[in-house]
Amino acid sequence: MTVREVLSQKALHVETGVTLGGVSRDDMILELGDHSLMIPVDRGDHRILYYLPAAPRWDDNGEPLPAGVGDNLREIVTEISRFWGQEPEFRIRHYGAAED
């Protein structure tokens, strides 16, 4: 596994340089350099449901995530979630609506 703890609720995916951390009970933040993407979540016992955008874009400038991150977003989030002992589930959001 290529994940390292940065803070108590923030972890680094070593291969991509992406960090994922808790912002609130209902949100996680994915960061790379100065860019960030807020990801809504629903937490449960030993599982976490992530609502990922269909076409991930940085919140700060609207640009798409780099190919190595955007194309592997589920895998990156899965590795970090499992590092925390949480089994991830995913729903894809299209224009504000969540889908499986």
Image (cartoon, grey):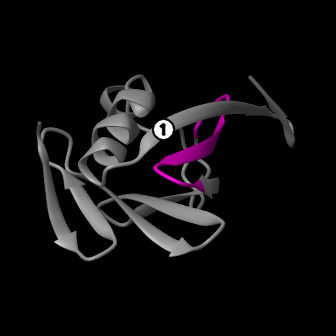
Magenta span has 21? no
For residue 42, which quarter of the picture? bottom right
Query: In the displayed structure, does residue 13 sit left or right of residue 42?
Result: left
Give the structural element (helix, strand or loop) at label 1. Answer: strand
Query: In the displayed structure, does residue 35 sit left or right of residue 93?
Result: left
How many numbered markers are drawn? 1
Residue 40 in sight from this viewpoint? no
Residue 81 in sight from this viewpoint? yes
Q: Position of residue 31 (x, y in %)?
A: 38, 59
Looking at the picture, tell me which residue is in the foreground, 45 or 88.
45
Residue span colored magenta: 44-56
Q: Quadrant of the C terminus?
A: top right
Looking at the picture, tell me which residue is in the foreground, 58 or 15.
15
For residue 11, which quarter of the picture? bottom left
What residue do we see at 46% from left, 70% from top?
A: 22
Q: Position of residue 9 (x, y in %)?
A: 34, 72
Residue type at tag 1: Pro
Q: Position of residue 62 (x, y in %)?
A: 62, 50
Query: In the displayed structure, does residue 73 sit left or right of residue 10?
Result: right
What residue do we see at 68% from left, 32% from top?
A: 91
For residue 38, which quarter of the picture? bottom right
Q: Position of residue 67 (x, y in %)?
A: 37, 26
Main SS, magenta region, reads strand
What residue do we see at 54% from left, 48% from top?
A: 48
Q: Quadrant of the N terminus?
A: top left
Looking at the picture, tell me which residue is in the foreground, 83 or 4.
83
What residue do we see at 16% from left, 64% from top?
A: 5
Category of crowding for the residue at label 1, using alpha-carbon neighbours closer than 10 angstroms: few (below 14), some (14–19), many (at least 20): some
The residue where tag 1 is placed is: 88
